[in-house]
Amino acid sequence: MSISACETTASRYQRAGRVDHAYMPVGPRSFVGYRSRMTSSPQVSIERSRTPQTSARREEILSDPRFGVYFTDHMYVCRWTPDTGWHGATVKPYGPFSIDPATSVLHYAQEVFEGLKAYRHPDGSVWLFRPEVNAARFARSAARLALPVVPEGDFIAALEALVTTDIDWVPSVGGADGSEKSLYLRPFMFASEVFLGVRPAKEVVFTVIASPAGSYFDGGVRSVSIWLSEELTRAAPGGTGAAKCGGNYAASLLAQQEAAANGCEQVVFLDAAERSILEELGGMNLFFVYADGSLATPELNGSILEGVTRASLIELAEDLGHKVDERAISIDEWREGVARGEITEVFACGTAAVVTPVAALRWRGGELASPMPTGEVTMQLRNQLLDIQYGRAADSHGWLHRVG
């Protein structure tokens, strides 16, 4: 059994361990596939686990998967060096990596990752949602972290190889009963070279793992309270905010602790320069619904992650006749807009949590309740997106990619 996967051609920029940035998509809403000059691909070898979970245990897990707790029987692994390029693409039994204490990623955090889901439709078929968009963002993130690029076709082939091998792990129930079950996929890449020194690694691992998932928040969809981080920031202009790398999430954890201590489930960050412009949550983008039916979301400014769910909701909202503005939004506009009745709904969005209504904003010495904690537009967009992902509505945008 074989599937086309990671590229092997040791092109000029591969041998240098770099990407030609002139080929990278840039700018707001720039989900354009990376144009690779690498042309040959190895084959994926499949090494099946000799000790997979029993059917009974797997079904027990799938009945209540939670989020990020259980993992499938296999994982995809591919390695890169400047001389060989990508090689050794394998779907193998899920298990730990052997990491030397001097492995580069442990010291210099040279790593990137992605997150997307596989959905089982009513007819039993299995589909990915916009994997080419994740592939393009993965390429941009890799370029920013001085890592080699996995071309779009090979990124998707890696997902296909793992999902088809572990197809029985894709939950058979999702969405209609409120469970929203899916198979969450986590592609990631890290510097695996053993050395101490501040330079891009010459050995890299690209891997994909999978985890059956239920609702991101306990109890399913519900409105959440947001803590305003007035001192700590997530990212700054010229930094890595637009890349999906672990350091950005690590930078959000202290503020997330502060949020939890103040009874909030999430934290929202302000810009690093003036501490007045809204950016994003620790792992989600933010939207506002106005009384006139229009929507607004913070513009992509180089320090905000270009969310796949964000981009999809913009298109769906426009399909439904809503005007959507991508612009700078201040914290004062949020506060004053709610007070004047101009802002009627607030929600956050991301792959893991889909669309989550915001019930309240809290900060030191104050709190602001949303007029409609679970608003009509919020839920309409949420349901429309889920209906497409789970095959209950027509995919007029061509977003779905069949894998089984």
Image: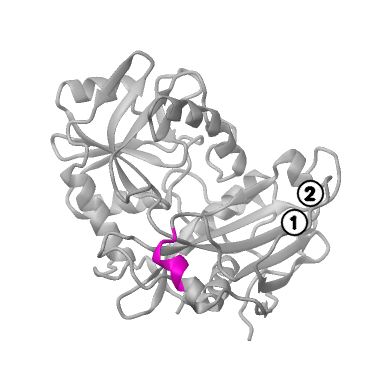
- In terms of image quadrants, where is residue 203? bottom right
Checking the image for residue 201, the label placed there is: 2
286 to the left or right of 100: left
| Amino acid type assigned to the residue bearing label 2 in the image | Ala
Q: Residues within 10 Å of mark 1 (few under 14, many from 20)?
A: many
Magenta stretch: residue 321 in it? no
Nearer-the-camera pick, 184 or 257: 257
Q: Pointers 1 and 2 in contact (CB under 8 A)?
A: yes
Does the image show residue 214? yes
Nearer-the-camera pick, 217 or 248: 217
Magenta stretch: residue 61 in it? yes
Does the image show residue 236? no
Secondary element at tag 1: strand
- Magenta range is 59-65
Looking at the image, residue 351 lies above or below residue 286? below
- In terms of image quadrants, where is residue 122? bottom left
Q: Quadrant of the N terminus?
A: bottom right
87 to the left or right of 124: right
Q: CA distance from mark 1 to mark 2?
A: 7 Å
Checking the image for residue 144, the label placed there is: none
Looking at the image, residue 114 lies above or below residue 224? below
